[in-house]
Image (cartoon, rainbow, N blue to C red):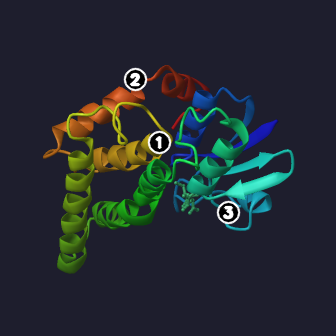
Amino acid sequence: MIRLHHLRIGRSIFTVWQLEELGVPYELIEYIRDPKTFLAPPELKKVHASGKSPVIDDDGVVVAESIAITTYLLQMYDPQNRFAPARSNLKEWARFTQWLHYPEGSVFTPLLVKMLLIRSGQEHAAFDAFSSREIKLHMDYIAAQLGTKPYILGDSFSAADFGVSYVVSLAKRLGQLGNWPTLDTYLTRNQSRPAYMRALERAIE
Ligand SMILES: N[C@@H](CCC(=O)N[C@@H](CS)C(=O)NCC(=O)O)C(=O)O
């Protein structure tokens, strides 16, 4: 059975959600951040050298990095292509892959800079200008891609919606969604899915 190493608070709730969508049985092992440093506890280093979460252990196959985990889970547990286009459909698959990687690869960094600025309570004009400009660019791009469609690839939910929901939820948490009400609606739509609700019941974010 899959063991998911889940750190509270963090992005691994989105991996819990994926497992719920896939309907794969899993065991949840929870870790709590150090209240002073906010870092993961050292036990996580015994699971994976990075000491970060999420990490899954699927009968001895240990995978870290949230997008690598999604890719692995789709390969192993979505043979019917319920959550991603088939690789043989190269054009659709390429579009999917871009949206799968975009949140972690591009959107997360300016959100992290904004989070650090807010948490530190310090002002830094250059960091603030960078994070505000990049957050606007990315939120505009996501909103334009969505248009009037419910999901990031169009009419159907896909695994790309996990990561996009993650960065949109982080932007919301940081008070950055004011100009993008459609992104708030998108987030609510995804977080109203029964699988997301089940994830929240099993694991506190
Ligand atoms: N790029 C990695 C990032 C992993 C990561 O930084 N996880 C955070 C939680 S959201 C963590 O473990 N932080 C604890 C720490 O840095 O000690 C991924 O996508 O999984």
> Quadrant of the image for the N terminus?
top right
Residue 161, image x and y in percent? 43, 41
The one of 177 and 145 positioned closer to us in this rendering: 145
The one of 173 and 133 positioned closer to us in this rendering: 133
- Residue type pointed to by label 1: Phe
- Residue type pointed to by label 3: Gly
Query: What residue is pinned by disc 3?
Result: 51
| Label 3 close to label 2 by CB (< 8 Å) | no
CA distance separating discs 1 and 2? 13 Å
Query: What residue is pinned by disc 2?
Result: 192
| Mark 1 beta carbon near ligand 1 (under 8 Å) | no
Looking at marks 3 and 2 on the same chain, the residue that comes earlier in the sequence is marked by 3
* Residue occupying the point 30% across, 34% down: 186
Helix, strand or loop status at disc 1: helix
| Label 1 close to label 2 by CB (< 8 Å) | no
Quadrant containing ligand 1 reads bottom right
Mark 3, other Cα within 10 Å: few <14 / some 14–19 / many ≥20: some
Left or right: 192 with respect to 199? left
Q: Which mark is residue 162?
A: 1
- Residue type pointed to by label 2: Ser
Residue 45, image x and y in percent? 74, 63
Residue 192, image x and y in percent? 40, 23
CA distance separating discs 3 and 2? 31 Å
Helix, strand or loop status at disc 2: loop
* Residue occupying the point 20% across, 79% down: 126
Q: Please identify the quarter of the rendering in which residue 122 is found.
A: bottom left
Mark 2, other Cα within 10 Å: few <14 / some 14–19 / many ≥20: few
Looking at marks 1 and 2 on the same chain, the residue that comes earlier in the sequence is marked by 1
